[in-house]
Amino acid sequence: MRHLAVLALATCAACVTGPFDQTVLSSRTQPIAVNGLAGAPVDHMELEYYDATFSHSWIHLSAAVSASTPTVTGPQSLYSYNFGTVTVPPVAWSWVACGNDTARPRVVEQGYELGTFTEDAWDCTVDQLHAGVDAVNAGYACSTGSEITLVYYVGPC
């Protein structure tokens, strides 16, 4: 399984590898680790959250710098980045459906939103790789978009 995880990490031109899209949290204050791969050594990456309460716009939460040496080498070298462990700010949580609160973070590299994956999308990516698809195209084929939806289950309606 570890081999498949390493393979899956190399499946994007630039992407978020943690947390997965549709991650369920145990509380609104549960810390999450945010990390991934960039297509180049980047001096500035941004972690943003959608402000669900006031401005209905994207708010800056944190910045990171990607590694200066490639984490994954090949036709497309990839550079790791890590925002560390963060907590979703209260303003980013919104009530969407019966008993669920959600937050929508995204990572932006030089103005571009990075791709995200659910756990099933990682499985899709691994299947694509086994079928001979190159890593970048496998990542594009299976990505779930550019936002991560975090879910906190409050309780029944």
Image (spheres, grey):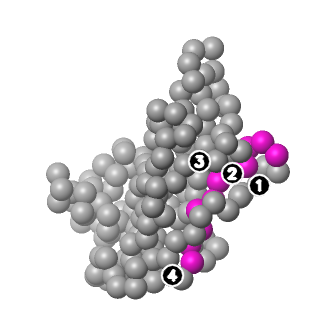
Can residue 92 be found in the magenta stretch? no
- Secondary element at tag 4: loop
Kind of residue at disc 3: Val
Per the model, the C-alpha gap separating discs 3 and 4 is 24 Å
Image mark for residue 42: 4
Mark 2 and mark 3: Cα distance apart in space: 10 Å
Q: Which residue is disc 1 drawn over?
A: 57
Query: 54 left or right of 23?
Result: right
Q: Which mark is residue 129?
A: none
How packed mark 2 is, by other alpha carbons closer than 10 Å (few <14, some 14-19, many 20 or more), is: many
State which tag comes first along the sequence, 4 or 2.
4
Amino acid at pointer 4: Val
* 123, above or below 46, in the image: above
- Mark 3 lies on residue: 88
In percent of the image, x 56 and y 37: which residue is there? Answer: 28
Residue displayed at 18% across by 56% down: 2
Whether 101 is drawn above or below 53: the answer is above
Which mark, by number, is residue 50? Answer: 2
Percent of width and height locating residue 35:
43, 62
In the rendered structure, which disc, 4 or 1, sits on the residue that comes first in sequence? 4
Q: Which residues are magenta?
A: 44-54
State which tag comes first along the sequence, 2 or 1: 2
Q: Residue at x 37, y 77 (%)?
A: 78
Q: Kindly identify the amino acid type of the residue bearing the numbered disc 2.
A: Tyr
- How far separated are the C-alphas under marks 4 and 1? 24 Å
Query: Would you say 110 lies left or right of 41 here?
Result: right
Decide: few, some or many residues near mark 1? Use Cα within 10 Å; few <14, some 14-19, many ≥20: few
Q: Earlier in the sequence, mark 2 or mark 3?
A: 2
Compare marks 1 and 3 and give the one earlier in the sequence: 1
Residue 123: where, in percent of width, then height?
30, 49
What's the CA distance linking mark 2 and mark 1?
Answer: 6 Å
Q: Secondary structure at mark 1?
A: loop
